Image: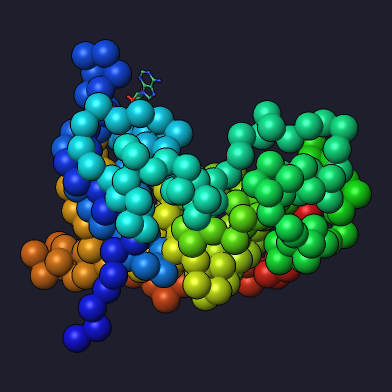
Amino acid sequence: METKKAIITVNNLVKKYDDFVAVQDLSFEVYENEIFGLLGPNGAGKTTTLEIIETLRDKTSGEIIVDGFSVDKQAQEIKQIIGVQLQAAGYYPNLNLVELLELFAGLYGADIKPMEMLEKVNLQDKAKARYKALSGGQKQRFSIATTLINQPKIIFLDEPTTGLDPQARRNLWDLITDIRSNGTTVVITTHYMDEAEQLCDRVAFVERGQIIALDTPDQLIDNLVNSGFERKKEVKKANLEDVFIHLTGKEWRE
Ligand SMILES: Nc1ncnc2c1ncn2[C@@H]1O[C@H](COP(=O)(O)OP(=O)(O)OP(=O)(O)O)[C@@H](O)[C@H]1O
Protein backbone atom coordinates (compact mmCIF):
# COMPACT_ATOMS: atom_id res chain seq x y z
CA MET A 1 0.00 0.00 0.00
CA GLU A 2 1.15 3.52 -0.76
CA THR A 3 2.39 5.24 2.39
CA LYS A 4 1.52 8.89 2.71
CA LYS A 5 3.95 11.38 4.14
CA ALA A 6 2.60 14.04 6.48
CA ILE A 7 3.66 17.59 5.59
CA ILE A 8 1.61 19.14 8.40
CA THR A 9 1.10 17.49 11.80
CA VAL A 10 -1.20 19.07 14.37
CA ASN A 11 -1.22 17.47 17.82
CA ASN A 12 -3.64 18.42 20.59
CA LEU A 13 -4.05 22.01 19.43
CA VAL A 14 -5.93 24.25 21.86
CA LYS A 15 -6.77 27.93 21.37
CA LYS A 16 -8.54 29.97 24.02
CA TYR A 17 -9.69 33.55 23.64
CA ASP A 18 -9.87 34.48 27.33
CA ASP A 19 -12.31 31.89 28.75
CA PHE A 20 -13.71 30.90 25.36
CA VAL A 21 -12.26 27.73 23.89
CA ALA A 22 -12.27 28.20 20.10
CA VAL A 23 -10.14 25.11 19.33
CA GLN A 24 -10.31 22.07 21.62
CA ASP A 25 -7.62 19.43 21.41
CA LEU A 26 -7.47 19.23 17.61
CA SER A 27 -5.18 16.61 16.02
CA PHE A 28 -4.78 15.81 12.32
CA GLU A 29 -2.24 15.36 9.58
CA VAL A 30 -2.15 16.83 6.08
CA TYR A 31 -0.38 14.62 3.57
CA GLU A 32 2.13 15.87 1.07
CA ASN A 33 0.55 16.95 -2.23
CA GLU A 34 -3.08 16.48 -1.25
CA ILE A 35 -5.94 18.96 -1.21
CA PHE A 36 -7.11 18.90 2.39
CA GLY A 37 -10.40 20.55 3.36
CA LEU A 38 -11.40 21.95 6.72
CA LEU A 39 -15.19 22.06 6.77
CA GLY A 40 -17.61 23.24 9.38
CA PRO A 41 -20.18 25.84 10.34
CA ASN A 42 -19.43 29.51 11.05
CA GLY A 43 -17.38 29.92 14.18
CA ALA A 44 -16.22 26.28 14.26
CA GLY A 45 -12.56 27.33 14.54
CA LYS A 46 -11.32 26.76 10.98
CA THR A 47 -9.73 30.17 10.41
CA THR A 48 -8.18 30.15 13.87
CA THR A 49 -6.62 26.75 13.16
CA LEU A 50 -5.31 27.85 9.75
CA GLU A 51 -3.83 31.05 11.13
CA ILE A 52 -2.03 29.18 13.90
CA ILE A 53 -0.51 26.77 11.37
CA GLU A 54 0.45 29.78 9.22
CA THR A 55 2.30 31.18 12.28
CA LEU A 56 0.07 34.28 12.17
CA ARG A 57 -1.69 33.58 15.47
CA ASP A 58 -0.44 32.23 18.81
CA LYS A 59 -1.79 28.95 20.15
CA THR A 60 -2.65 28.23 23.76
CA SER A 61 -1.12 24.73 23.70
CA GLY A 62 -0.37 21.79 21.43
CA GLU A 63 2.27 20.99 18.87
CA ILE A 64 2.41 21.85 15.17
CA ILE A 65 5.06 20.68 12.74
CA VAL A 66 5.10 22.00 9.16
CA ASP A 67 7.49 20.21 6.81
CA GLY A 68 9.69 19.29 9.76
CA PHE A 69 9.66 22.79 11.30
CA SER A 70 8.03 23.59 14.63
CA VAL A 71 5.73 26.65 14.80
CA ASP A 72 7.21 27.42 18.22
CA LYS A 73 10.83 27.62 17.24
CA GLN A 74 10.99 27.85 13.44
CA ALA A 75 8.22 30.22 12.40
CA GLN A 76 10.54 32.00 9.95
CA GLU A 77 11.41 28.73 8.20
CA ILE A 78 7.71 27.89 7.95
CA LYS A 79 6.91 31.31 6.45
CA GLN A 80 9.45 30.62 3.70
CA ILE A 81 7.70 27.48 2.48
CA ILE A 82 4.03 28.43 2.78
CA GLY A 83 1.78 30.64 0.68
CA VAL A 84 -0.87 32.68 2.43
CA GLN A 85 -3.61 34.88 0.97
CA LEU A 86 -2.91 38.48 1.92
CA GLN A 87 -5.70 40.61 3.30
CA ALA A 88 -7.20 42.90 0.66
CA ALA A 89 -6.11 45.85 2.82
CA GLY A 90 -2.53 45.11 1.72
CA TYR A 91 -3.36 45.83 -1.92
CA TYR A 92 -2.21 49.44 -2.26
CA PRO A 93 -4.93 51.25 -4.26
CA ASN A 94 -2.62 53.09 -6.65
CA LEU A 95 -0.63 50.08 -7.82
CA ASN A 96 -1.67 47.86 -10.71
CA LEU A 97 -1.53 44.05 -10.57
CA VAL A 98 1.99 43.79 -11.98
CA GLU A 99 3.25 46.43 -9.55
CA LEU A 100 1.54 44.69 -6.62
CA LEU A 101 3.13 41.35 -7.52
CA GLU A 102 6.54 43.05 -7.80
CA LEU A 103 6.02 44.68 -4.41
CA PHE A 104 5.07 41.39 -2.72
CA ALA A 105 7.93 39.56 -4.45
CA GLY A 106 10.28 42.19 -3.05
CA LEU A 107 8.97 41.55 0.46
CA TYR A 108 9.69 37.83 0.04
CA GLY A 109 13.02 38.45 -1.67
CA ALA A 110 11.65 36.35 -4.55
CA ASP A 111 12.48 36.75 -8.21
CA ILE A 112 9.27 36.45 -10.23
CA LYS A 113 7.92 37.11 -13.69
CA PRO A 114 4.66 38.98 -12.97
CA MET A 115 3.11 38.30 -16.38
CA GLU A 116 3.72 34.57 -16.06
CA MET A 117 2.06 34.62 -12.64
CA LEU A 118 -0.93 36.50 -14.03
CA GLU A 119 -1.20 34.01 -16.89
CA LYS A 120 -1.39 31.15 -14.38
CA VAL A 121 -4.58 32.66 -13.00
CA ASN A 122 -5.88 33.91 -16.34
CA LEU A 123 -5.48 37.60 -15.50
CA GLN A 124 -2.94 38.57 -18.14
CA ASP A 125 -5.46 41.00 -19.68
CA LYS A 126 -5.74 42.80 -16.33
CA ALA A 127 -2.02 43.40 -15.83
CA LYS A 128 -2.47 47.18 -15.77
CA ALA A 129 -5.71 47.14 -13.76
CA ARG A 130 -5.92 48.07 -10.10
CA TYR A 131 -7.14 45.51 -7.60
CA LYS A 132 -10.31 47.41 -6.73
CA ALA A 133 -11.37 47.40 -10.40
CA LEU A 134 -11.47 43.58 -10.49
CA SER A 135 -14.61 41.46 -10.19
CA GLY A 136 -15.04 39.10 -7.22
CA GLY A 137 -13.71 36.08 -9.13
CA GLN A 138 -10.75 38.04 -10.48
CA LYS A 139 -9.92 39.28 -6.99
CA GLN A 140 -9.87 35.69 -5.72
CA ARG A 141 -7.66 34.59 -8.60
CA PHE A 142 -5.25 37.44 -7.97
CA SER A 143 -5.21 36.57 -4.30
CA ILE A 144 -4.34 32.95 -5.20
CA ALA A 145 -1.55 34.21 -7.49
CA THR A 146 -0.06 36.10 -4.53
CA THR A 147 0.13 32.84 -2.54
CA LEU A 148 2.41 31.37 -5.24
CA ILE A 149 5.02 34.17 -5.25
CA ASN A 150 7.56 32.36 -3.08
CA GLN A 151 7.00 29.01 -4.85
CA PRO A 152 5.59 27.53 -1.65
CA LYS A 153 5.30 23.83 -0.76
CA ILE A 154 1.92 24.45 0.85
CA ILE A 155 -0.76 27.06 0.20
CA PHE A 156 -3.64 27.95 2.51
CA LEU A 157 -6.92 29.15 1.01
CA ASP A 158 -9.62 30.41 3.36
CA GLU A 159 -13.01 30.19 1.64
CA PRO A 160 -11.61 31.06 -1.79
CA THR A 161 -14.88 30.66 -3.68
CA THR A 162 -17.32 32.39 -1.35
CA GLY A 163 -19.56 34.74 -3.28
CA LEU A 164 -18.51 33.57 -6.74
CA ASP A 165 -20.81 32.51 -9.57
CA PRO A 166 -20.86 28.83 -10.70
CA GLN A 167 -18.45 29.37 -13.62
CA ALA A 168 -15.97 31.25 -11.49
CA ARG A 169 -16.18 28.58 -8.78
CA ARG A 170 -15.60 25.69 -11.16
CA ASN A 171 -12.74 27.51 -12.87
CA LEU A 172 -11.15 28.15 -9.50
CA TRP A 173 -11.44 24.43 -8.75
CA ASP A 174 -9.51 23.76 -11.97
CA LEU A 175 -6.90 26.33 -10.95
CA ILE A 176 -6.50 24.78 -7.49
CA THR A 177 -6.24 21.30 -9.02
CA ASP A 178 -3.52 22.57 -11.40
CA ILE A 179 -1.61 24.06 -8.48
CA ARG A 180 -1.72 20.69 -6.74
CA SER A 181 -0.62 18.94 -9.96
CA ASN A 182 2.48 21.12 -9.89
CA GLY A 183 3.43 19.56 -6.56
CA THR A 184 1.92 22.00 -4.06
CA THR A 185 -0.09 20.84 -1.05
CA VAL A 186 -3.34 22.78 -0.64
CA VAL A 187 -5.23 23.37 2.61
CA ILE A 188 -8.63 24.93 2.02
CA THR A 189 -11.64 25.92 4.09
CA THR A 190 -15.08 25.99 2.54
CA HIS A 191 -18.76 25.99 3.40
CA TYR A 192 -19.66 24.39 0.08
CA MET A 193 -20.01 20.63 0.35
CA ASP A 194 -20.12 20.10 -3.42
CA GLU A 195 -16.82 21.92 -3.62
CA ALA A 196 -15.26 19.76 -0.92
CA GLU A 197 -16.59 16.61 -2.60
CA GLN A 198 -15.17 17.58 -6.02
CA LEU A 199 -11.92 19.12 -4.94
CA CYS A 200 -10.63 17.62 -1.71
CA ASP A 201 -8.72 14.37 -1.34
CA ARG A 202 -9.59 14.32 2.36
CA VAL A 203 -11.76 16.50 4.55
CA ALA A 204 -12.02 17.14 8.27
CA PHE A 205 -15.33 18.29 9.70
CA VAL A 206 -14.78 20.75 12.52
CA GLU A 207 -17.56 21.49 14.99
CA ARG A 208 -17.11 23.70 18.07
CA GLY A 209 -13.35 23.47 17.79
CA GLN A 210 -13.22 19.68 17.52
CA ILE A 211 -12.81 17.29 14.60
CA ILE A 212 -15.91 15.14 14.38
CA ALA A 213 -14.97 13.23 11.19
CA LEU A 214 -11.94 12.97 8.92
CA ASP A 215 -11.64 10.88 5.76
CA THR A 216 -11.96 10.97 1.98
CA PRO A 217 -15.30 12.39 0.79
CA ASP A 218 -16.09 8.99 -0.79
CA GLN A 219 -15.49 7.10 2.42
CA LEU A 220 -17.51 9.53 4.54
CA ILE A 221 -20.44 9.22 2.13
CA ASP A 222 -20.12 5.40 2.02
CA ASN A 223 -20.08 5.27 5.83
CA LEU A 224 -23.31 7.26 5.95
CA VAL A 225 -24.99 5.12 3.28
CA ASN A 226 -23.84 1.92 5.02
CA SER A 227 -25.41 3.16 8.24
CA GLY A 228 -28.79 2.96 6.48
CA PHE A 229 -29.14 6.60 5.49
CA GLU A 230 -31.24 7.27 2.42
CA ARG A 231 -32.00 10.55 0.72
CA LYS A 232 -35.68 11.43 0.72
CA LYS A 233 -35.68 12.55 -2.90
CA GLU A 234 -34.47 10.47 -5.79
CA VAL A 235 -30.98 11.54 -6.76
CA LYS A 236 -30.75 12.82 -10.32
CA LYS A 237 -27.71 12.57 -12.53
CA ALA A 238 -27.39 16.35 -12.71
CA ASN A 239 -28.34 19.26 -10.49
CA LEU A 240 -29.57 22.80 -11.09
CA GLU A 241 -26.01 24.10 -11.14
CA ASP A 242 -25.20 21.70 -13.99
CA VAL A 243 -28.20 23.11 -15.87
CA PHE A 244 -26.92 26.66 -15.27
CA ILE A 245 -23.45 25.78 -16.55
CA HIS A 246 -24.89 23.87 -19.51
CA LEU A 247 -27.02 26.85 -20.51
CA THR A 248 -24.52 29.62 -19.91
CA GLY A 249 -21.17 27.97 -20.69
CA LYS A 250 -18.01 27.33 -18.74
CA GLU A 251 -15.86 30.26 -19.73
CA TRP A 252 -14.69 32.97 -17.35
CA ARG A 253 -17.25 35.76 -17.24
CA GLU A 254 -15.72 38.79 -15.62
N1 LIG B 1 -9.63 37.47 18.13
C1 LIG B 1 -10.64 36.81 18.68
N2 LIG B 1 -11.05 37.11 19.93
C2 LIG B 1 -12.08 36.43 20.49
N3 LIG B 1 -12.76 35.43 19.90
C3 LIG B 1 -12.40 35.09 18.65
C4 LIG B 1 -11.32 35.78 17.97
N4 LIG B 1 -11.19 35.22 16.73
C5 LIG B 1 -12.14 34.25 16.64
N5 LIG B 1 -12.86 34.18 17.79
C6 LIG B 1 -13.97 33.25 18.06
O1 LIG B 1 -13.47 31.92 17.91
C7 LIG B 1 -14.45 31.09 17.26
C8 LIG B 1 -13.83 30.48 16.02
O2 LIG B 1 -13.64 31.49 15.04
P1 LIG B 1 -13.04 31.18 13.60
O3 LIG B 1 -12.95 32.46 12.87
O4 LIG B 1 -11.80 30.39 13.75
O5 LIG B 1 -14.18 30.26 12.99
P2 LIG B 1 -14.40 29.73 11.51
O6 LIG B 1 -14.67 28.28 11.63
O7 LIG B 1 -13.28 30.16 10.64
O8 LIG B 1 -15.71 30.48 11.11
P3 LIG B 1 -16.21 31.10 9.70
O9 LIG B 1 -16.65 29.93 8.89
O10 LIG B 1 -17.34 31.96 10.10
O11 LIG B 1 -15.05 31.84 9.10
C9 LIG B 1 -15.65 31.98 16.99
O12 LIG B 1 -16.59 31.77 18.02
C10 LIG B 1 -15.08 33.39 17.04
O13 LIG B 1 -16.04 34.30 17.50
Relative placement, left or right, of 186 versus 172 is: left
Give the residue furthest to the left: 227
Residue sitting nearer the eye, 14 or 210: 14
Give the residue furthest to the right: 128
Residue 171 higher or lower than 103, as above or below: below
Residue sitting nearer the eye, 174 or 95: 95
**One can see residue 97 in this view:** no
User: Which image quarter is the N terminus in?
Assistant: bottom left
Q: Quadrant of residue 18?
A: top left
Image quarter for ligand 1 equals top left
**What x and y, as percent, mark residue 105?**
71, 49
User: Which image quarter is the C terminus in?
Assistant: bottom right
**Residue at the location (49% across, 66% down)?**
184
Give the residue furthest to the front: 73
**What x and y, as percent, mark residue 224?**
16, 63
**What x and y, as percent, mark residue 14?**
22, 32
Q: Quadrant of residue 106?
A: top right
State how many labels appear.
0
Residue sitting nearer the eye, 164 or 200: 200
Indicate how the structure is coloured in the image: rainbow
Residue 96 higher or lower than 2, as above or below: above
**One can see residue 189 in this view:** yes
**Residue at the location (20% across, 37% down)?**
62
